Image (cartoon, rainbow, N blue to C red):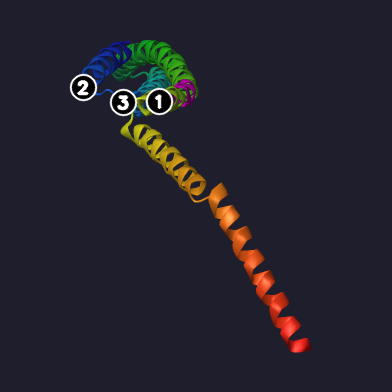
Amino acid sequence: MPIFEKIRRIFNSNINDLLDRVEDPEKILNQLLEDMQHELKEVKIQVAAAIRDGNKFEAQYKENLEGAEKWEKRAIVFIQNGDDARAKEALRRKRSADDLAAGFCEQFEAQQGSVSVLKDGLATLEQKIEEAKSKRALLIARQRRAEAERAIHQTVSGLSDSSALNAFDRIQDRVLDAEAEAEALSEMRQPSLEDEFDKLDKKDEIDDELAKLKARLKE
Protein backbone atom coordinates (compact mmCIF):
# COMPACT_ATOMS: atom_id res chain seq x y z
CA MET A 1 0.00 0.00 0.00
CA PRO A 2 1.23 3.56 -0.70
CA ILE A 3 1.01 4.56 2.96
CA PHE A 4 3.54 1.89 3.97
CA GLU A 5 5.87 2.80 1.12
CA LYS A 6 5.68 6.43 2.24
CA ILE A 7 6.42 5.45 5.83
CA ARG A 8 9.38 3.34 4.71
CA ARG A 9 10.86 6.24 2.73
CA ILE A 10 10.34 8.74 5.56
CA PHE A 11 11.70 6.33 8.15
CA ASN A 12 14.83 5.53 6.12
CA SER A 13 15.38 9.22 5.47
CA ASN A 14 15.13 9.98 9.17
CA ILE A 15 17.60 7.22 10.02
CA ASN A 16 20.19 8.52 7.56
CA ASP A 17 19.71 12.09 8.74
CA LEU A 18 20.07 11.11 12.40
CA LEU A 19 23.17 9.01 11.78
CA ASP A 20 24.77 11.96 10.00
CA ARG A 21 23.90 14.53 12.68
CA VAL A 22 23.93 12.72 16.04
CA GLU A 23 26.74 10.71 17.61
CA ASP A 24 24.88 9.57 20.72
CA PRO A 25 23.31 6.14 19.97
CA GLU A 26 20.76 6.56 22.77
CA LYS A 27 19.48 9.81 21.25
CA ILE A 28 19.30 8.17 17.82
CA LEU A 29 17.35 5.19 19.13
CA ASN A 30 14.94 7.39 21.08
CA GLN A 31 14.35 9.59 18.04
CA LEU A 32 13.80 6.59 15.78
CA LEU A 33 11.24 5.13 18.16
CA GLU A 34 9.53 8.48 18.38
CA ASP A 35 9.34 8.59 14.58
CA MET A 36 8.01 5.04 14.47
CA GLN A 37 5.33 5.88 17.03
CA HIS A 38 4.33 8.90 14.95
CA GLU A 39 4.09 6.79 11.81
CA LEU A 40 2.10 4.17 13.73
CA LYS A 41 -0.36 6.87 14.66
CA GLU A 42 -0.64 7.88 10.99
CA VAL A 43 -1.24 4.26 9.94
CA LYS A 44 -3.96 3.86 12.57
CA ILE A 45 -5.64 6.95 11.16
CA GLN A 46 -5.44 5.45 7.67
CA VAL A 47 -6.85 2.14 8.85
CA ALA A 48 -9.70 3.88 10.67
CA ALA A 49 -10.47 5.94 7.54
CA ALA A 50 -10.45 2.81 5.37
CA ILE A 51 -12.80 1.02 7.76
CA ARG A 52 -15.07 4.06 7.83
CA ASP A 53 -15.16 4.21 4.02
CA GLY A 54 -15.86 0.48 3.88
CA ASN A 55 -18.77 0.91 6.26
CA LYS A 56 -20.14 3.71 4.07
CA PHE A 57 -19.91 1.52 0.95
CA GLU A 58 -21.68 -1.30 2.77
CA ALA A 59 -24.43 1.03 3.99
CA GLN A 60 -24.96 2.47 0.49
CA TYR A 61 -24.97 -1.02 -1.00
CA LYS A 62 -27.68 -2.15 1.43
CA GLU A 63 -29.63 1.08 0.94
CA ASN A 64 -29.70 0.70 -2.85
CA LEU A 65 -30.46 -3.00 -2.57
CA GLU A 66 -33.46 -2.17 -0.39
CA GLY A 67 -34.41 0.58 -2.85
CA ALA A 68 -34.36 -1.90 -5.75
CA GLU A 69 -36.62 -4.26 -3.81
CA LYS A 70 -38.97 -1.38 -2.99
CA TRP A 71 -39.27 -0.30 -6.66
CA GLU A 72 -39.84 -3.86 -7.71
CA LYS A 73 -42.77 -4.14 -5.27
CA ARG A 74 -44.17 -0.88 -6.62
CA ALA A 75 -43.85 -2.12 -10.18
CA ILE A 76 -45.88 -5.19 -9.19
CA VAL A 77 -48.57 -2.99 -7.68
CA PHE A 78 -48.70 -0.83 -10.83
CA ILE A 79 -48.99 -3.95 -13.02
CA GLN A 80 -51.78 -5.26 -10.83
CA ASN A 81 -53.52 -1.94 -11.27
CA GLY A 82 -53.01 -2.06 -15.02
CA ASP A 83 -50.69 0.96 -15.02
CA ASP A 84 -47.90 -0.26 -17.29
CA ALA A 85 -46.38 3.19 -17.75
CA ARG A 86 -45.74 3.60 -14.02
CA ALA A 87 -44.70 -0.02 -13.80
CA LYS A 88 -42.00 0.62 -16.43
CA GLU A 89 -40.79 3.74 -14.55
CA ALA A 90 -40.61 1.74 -11.34
CA LEU A 91 -38.62 -0.98 -13.11
CA ARG A 92 -36.21 1.65 -14.52
CA ARG A 93 -35.63 2.97 -11.00
CA LYS A 94 -35.20 -0.59 -9.77
CA ARG A 95 -32.52 -1.19 -12.39
CA SER A 96 -30.76 2.03 -11.43
CA ALA A 97 -30.81 1.01 -7.79
CA ASP A 98 -29.54 -2.47 -8.73
CA ASP A 99 -26.65 -0.93 -10.67
CA LEU A 100 -25.75 1.35 -7.78
CA ALA A 101 -26.01 -1.55 -5.33
CA ALA A 102 -23.69 -3.65 -7.51
CA GLY A 103 -21.20 -0.77 -7.75
CA PHE A 104 -21.19 -0.14 -4.01
CA CYS A 105 -20.94 -3.89 -3.36
CA GLU A 106 -17.84 -4.01 -5.58
CA GLN A 107 -16.34 -1.00 -3.78
CA PHE A 108 -17.16 -2.51 -0.40
CA GLU A 109 -15.45 -5.81 -1.25
CA ALA A 110 -12.40 -4.02 -2.61
CA GLN A 111 -12.28 -1.84 0.48
CA GLN A 112 -12.49 -4.92 2.66
CA GLY A 113 -9.36 -6.23 0.93
CA SER A 114 -7.60 -2.91 1.49
CA VAL A 115 -8.61 -2.85 5.15
CA SER A 116 -7.29 -6.38 5.59
CA VAL A 117 -3.92 -5.38 4.10
CA LEU A 118 -3.79 -2.26 6.24
CA LYS A 119 -4.61 -4.21 9.39
CA ASP A 120 -1.90 -6.75 8.62
CA GLY A 121 0.56 -3.93 8.01
CA LEU A 122 -0.50 -2.23 11.21
CA ALA A 123 0.01 -5.42 13.21
CA THR A 124 3.43 -5.88 11.63
CA LEU A 125 4.41 -2.28 12.41
CA GLU A 126 3.27 -2.64 16.03
CA GLN A 127 5.31 -5.82 16.33
CA LYS A 128 8.38 -4.12 14.84
CA ILE A 129 8.00 -1.23 17.29
CA GLU A 130 7.84 -3.62 20.25
CA GLU A 131 10.94 -5.39 18.94
CA ALA A 132 12.64 -2.02 18.50
CA LYS A 133 11.83 -1.09 22.10
CA SER A 134 13.42 -4.29 23.36
CA LYS A 135 16.45 -3.79 21.14
CA ARG A 136 16.73 -0.17 22.24
CA ALA A 137 16.91 -1.19 25.91
CA LEU A 138 19.59 -3.79 25.12
CA LEU A 139 21.61 -1.49 22.87
CA ILE A 140 21.48 1.38 25.35
CA ALA A 141 22.66 -0.93 28.14
CA ARG A 142 25.52 -2.18 25.96
CA GLN A 143 26.42 1.37 24.93
CA ARG A 144 26.51 2.58 28.53
CA ARG A 145 28.63 -0.38 29.58
CA ALA A 146 31.04 0.28 26.71
CA GLU A 147 31.28 3.96 27.68
CA ALA A 148 31.93 3.04 31.32
CA GLU A 149 34.65 0.56 30.35
CA ARG A 150 36.24 3.10 28.02
CA ALA A 151 36.20 5.76 30.75
CA ILE A 152 37.83 3.36 33.21
CA HIS A 153 40.54 2.37 30.73
CA GLN A 154 41.22 6.00 29.90
CA THR A 155 41.45 6.88 33.59
CA VAL A 156 43.79 3.99 34.37
CA SER A 157 45.92 4.78 31.34
CA GLY A 158 46.04 8.44 32.28
CA LEU A 159 47.10 7.69 35.83
CA SER A 160 50.27 5.98 34.67
CA ASP A 161 51.50 9.27 33.23
CA SER A 162 49.77 11.67 35.58
CA SER A 163 51.58 14.38 37.50
CA ALA A 164 49.71 13.30 40.65
CA LEU A 165 51.50 9.95 40.77
CA ASN A 166 54.79 11.65 40.00
CA ALA A 167 54.16 13.97 42.94
CA PHE A 168 53.58 10.96 45.20
CA ASP A 169 56.90 9.51 44.06
CA ARG A 170 58.71 12.78 44.76
CA ILE A 171 57.15 13.07 48.22
CA GLN A 172 58.15 9.49 48.96
CA ASP A 173 61.73 10.35 48.03
CA ARG A 174 61.63 13.36 50.35
CA VAL A 175 60.30 11.25 53.22
CA LEU A 176 63.04 8.70 52.69
CA ASP A 177 65.65 11.49 52.67
CA ALA A 178 64.18 12.97 55.86
CA GLU A 179 64.26 9.60 57.59
CA ALA A 180 67.87 9.03 56.55
CA GLU A 181 68.86 12.48 57.80
CA ALA A 182 67.16 11.91 61.15
CA GLU A 183 68.89 8.57 61.54
CA ALA A 184 72.24 10.16 60.76
CA LEU A 185 71.69 12.92 63.31
CA SER A 186 70.72 10.35 65.90
CA GLU A 187 73.94 8.44 65.32
CA MET A 188 75.94 11.67 65.55
CA ARG A 189 74.48 12.43 68.96
CA GLN A 190 75.55 9.10 70.55
CA PRO A 191 78.31 9.61 73.25
CA SER A 192 81.90 8.81 72.33
CA LEU A 193 84.27 6.62 74.39
CA GLU A 194 86.06 9.68 75.77
CA ASP A 195 82.75 11.08 76.96
CA GLU A 196 82.04 7.80 78.70
CA PHE A 197 85.42 7.83 80.44
CA ASP A 198 84.94 11.44 81.52
CA LYS A 199 81.61 10.51 83.06
CA LEU A 200 83.21 7.62 84.90
CA ASP A 201 85.99 9.85 86.23
CA LYS A 202 83.50 12.45 87.41
CA LYS A 203 81.49 9.73 89.13
CA ASP A 204 84.61 8.49 90.99
CA GLU A 205 85.42 12.01 92.18
CA ILE A 206 81.89 12.44 93.50
CA ASP A 207 82.16 9.13 95.33
CA ASP A 208 85.45 10.20 96.92
CA GLU A 209 83.99 13.50 98.03
CA LEU A 210 81.00 11.70 99.53
CA ALA A 211 83.26 9.33 101.48
CA LYS A 212 85.39 12.18 102.82
CA LEU A 213 82.28 14.07 103.89
CA LYS A 214 80.93 11.05 105.77
CA ALA A 215 84.28 10.51 107.50
CA ARG A 216 84.41 14.13 108.67
CA LEU A 217 80.94 13.87 110.08
CA LYS A 218 81.95 10.89 112.20
CA GLU A 219 84.78 12.79 113.92
Which quadrant is the N terminus positioned in?
Answer: top left
In the image shown, does 206 or 105 lie closer to the viewer? 206
Query: Where's residue 46, x and y in %?
Result: 33, 24
Any part of residue 191 in sight? no
**Disc 3 or disc 1, which is closer to the eye?**
1
> Could you tell me the amino acid type at mark 1?
Glu
Residue that appears at 40% across and 25% down: 147
Residue that appears at 56% across and 57% down: 198
Bounds of the magenta span?
135-142
> Could you tell me the amino acid type at mark 2?
Arg
Residue assigned mark 2 = 21
Residue assigned mark 3 = 24
Disc with the residue nearer the chain's start (3 vs 1): 3
Residue assigned mark 1 = 147
Distance from disc 3 to disc 1, alpha carbons, whole Å, reads 11 Å
Q: Residues within 10 Å of mark 1 (few under 14, many from 20)?
A: few
> On the picture, is 33 further left or further right than 186?
left
> Could you tell me the amino acid type at mark 3?
Asp
Query: Where's residue 91, x and y in %?
Result: 34, 14
> On the picture, is 96 further left or further right than 61?
left
Residue that appears at 38% across and 21% down: 54
